[in-house]
Image: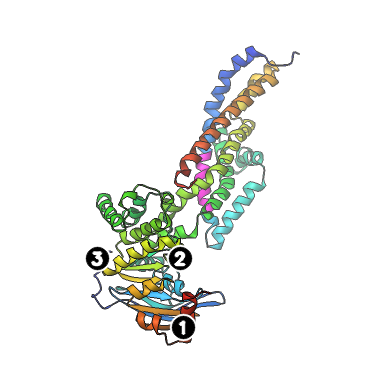
Amino acid sequence: MSTIPSAPRGGPLVEVRGLRKSFGELHVLRGVDLTVASGSVTVLIGPSGSGKTTALRCLNALEVPEAGVVRVGDCEVDFSRPVDKRTARTLRTQSGMVFQSHNLFPHMTVLQNIMEGPVTVQRRPREEVRTEALTLLDRVGLAEKADQFPFQLSGGQQQRVGIARALAIRPRLMLFDEPTSALDPELVGEVLTVMKDLAEQGWTMVVVTHEIRFAQAVADQVLFLDGGVVVERGAPDAVLTAPREPRTRRFLQRLLDPL
Amino acid sequence: MEQGIDWQLVRDSILPLLDGLVRGTIPVTAISFVLGLLLAVLVALMRLSKVRLVSWLARAYVSVIRGTPLLLQLFIIFFGLPAFGVTLDPYPSAIIAFTLNVAGYASEVVRASILAIPRGQWEAASSIGMDYATTLRRVVLPQATRVAVPPLSNTLISLVKDTSLASTILVTEMFRKAQEIAAPTFQFFTLYTVAAVIYWVVCFVLSVVQTRAEHRLGRYVAA
């Protein structure tokens, strides 16, 4: 991975054009375009079934779209042609993925979880990785949990380990799929704080979330998806406080005032 | 003829029976189980393959193994194959038959255990760059092992006792020893009882090992 030159800072790190995906008869994505500037935070919002999670998962080929071009850094994949596994894996390792249900490896300790990618996949020297993993753990505030198993941690701590594991493969881009949706309300803050820190450190991030306040505080651009298309996009102030589209307005209203 | 237990004969037969256990029953069981398990993983992965033909082959294999008597499988390999010019000694014949048989049953256990691992584990593994083989080796199979231990223990314990069928193709495992000693003395009850007790002790020990293995593999799971 280290042989790939880094993208020019400030230029778009991610470019997505014409993303299409259907599950059987259900058209989940119907032509989604997306540009993410290097070092910026993009937040995808939208009702369930709007395609926001699928769009995110297409960015690292966990979901294979039927058509569309995805470029991350200088790895560009055209999905309208058959994509071989190696290409998909190259695209995938450009980004670190944080899942809604953390998906930590339960049979490995916290430290082993973080070291697994760098050691087993990237074949980096174990001692060097170990030092780096401990630093990452410290950054997410869990240095003292290194030798615990995931089941011994709270949901918020598990999710922070998930973030450290994703960072450990040295990605250029961080993807977050509803990272706080499965958490008890009082644990949401600790995860969002870590994400905010990453944003301030200049990480390029694409985040699917319902945390509107996070989007307002951290995002550079917000995309509202509905029915598999981007209905509205722009700066958080514009999209979240003064949405032009009635659908965006209705969605935000329901989110802020569920009753 | 006097009935009941002949204790002198019990004492005299213990050593020959244990000899049959150590040189017949245990090695045949151990080798067949290990080879059978390896083959079972292969068959399970074939069955899970997206390639129809591969999956179908595995399915057919399991169907044949489970649909025919183990005794018949033993006989086909020992008495049947010579007709095609393949003549095997009793020992290898038994090991081949038991291996193939274990693989048939255990592959379904392995398959179910792999399917029991949540999809998110596969996704997390590929998100850190793992390919299929690495994901299996590092993430899925270690967790599937925990799920598989109780049903695989069943397979193993059955196998210990099923090896007595190898007596019919002249393998001198423990049951055949019991028959050999009993025949001239007519003390069938005594000999078969002693053999039964030894089989039970072996299976009991395996159950204890199973419990320990479950405990050990469960240490990363919340109580």
Amino acid on which the number 3 mark rests in the picture = Thr
Say the numbered circle drawn on residue A3. Answer: 3
**Residue B101: percent from left, percent from top:** 59, 43
In this rendering, the label closer to the viewer, 2 or 3:
2
Earlier in the chain: of badge 1 and badge 2, it is 2
Helix, strand or loop for disc 2: loop
- Nearer to us in this view, B120 or A134: A134
Earlier in the chain: of badge 3 and badge 1, it is 3
**Residue drawn at (56%, 58%) of the image:** B55
- Chain ID for label 1? A
Q: CA distance from mark 1 to mark 2?
A: 22 Å
**Residue drawn at (49%, 82%) of the image:** A250
Q: Quadrant of residue A161?
A: bottom left
Q: Which contiguous range is marked in magenta?
A: B33-44
Q: Is residue A71 visible?
A: no
Q: Is residue A135 visible?
A: yes
Q: Which residue is mark 1?
A: A249
Amino acid on which the number 1 mark rests in the picture = Arg
In this rendering, the label closer to the viewer, 3 or 1:
1
The crowding category of the residue bearing disc 1, from other C-alpha atoms within 10 Å (few below 14, some 14 to 19, many at least 20), is some
**Residue A50: percent from left, percent from top:** 49, 76
